[in-house]
Image (tube, helix red, strand yellow):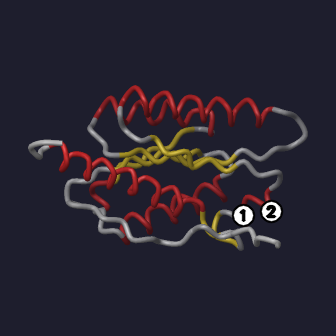
Amino acid sequence: MTVKKKTNLSELKEIELSSVENVHIGLVVAEWNNEVTGSLRDGALEALMHYGISRDNIKEVSVPGSFELPMGARALLKHKKYDAIICIGCVIKGETSHNEYINQSVATGLTQLGLTSGVPCIFGLLTPNNMEQALERAGGTHGNKGVEAAVTALSMVSMGQSLEKKGKSIGF
């Protein structure tokens, strides 16, 4: 039996948020490959607003490249309480192995930052082999991975909200 691989995961799903008025999201966008990252950013913003997050509750900053995404997220966290930080970038493989070092560093940095801060830092970094693959994932045939990053962020916010409710109850 052949299982068909899902290629477009950019579907909006039902997310239960107890209060969207107080949800604050940070958005860090790499300027490098801005044709791709701009489209990912737009997808993330549209998705956040679809779920009722006010544009006023979304703080956006840009960083020069994907390697700087963890520092951009950290800078946001130093200045305000966010419920999640979405980090968007694109590192195209190219002729050298630079992409492996950058991608691994960003993944490790965002994981450590999320664990130490307690704020989900979402890995919205495309790691394609070429520009064509990047564009397919930035609103093309494979959807928009910026939408997926926003859905992931709000899913984590929802999880946190549901745990807060349970923590206020009496008993087990």
Residue nearest the observer in this picture, 35 or 10: 10
Q: Are marks 1 and 2 in contact (CB under 8 Å)?
A: yes
Quarter of the picture containing the C terminus is top left
Residue nearest the observer in this picture, 117 or 3: 3
Separation (CA) of disc 1 from disc 2: 5 Å
Mark 2 falls on what kind of element? Answer: helix
Amino acid at circle 1: Leu
**Residue of label 1:** 135
Residue found farthest to the right: 95
Where is residue 14? Give x, y as percent.
Answer: 39, 71
In the rendered view, does 35 fall on the left or right side of 133? Answer: left
Where is residue 81? Give x, y as percent.
Answer: 27, 38
**Residue of label 2:** 132
Residue found farthest to the front: 172
User: Residue at point 72% right, 64% down?
Assistant: 135
Q: Which mark is residue 11?
A: none
Quarter of the picture containing the N terminus is bottom right
Amino acid at circle 2: Glu
Q: Residues within 10 Å of mark 1 (few under 14, many from 20)?
A: many
User: Residue at point 46% right, 48% down?
Assistant: 86
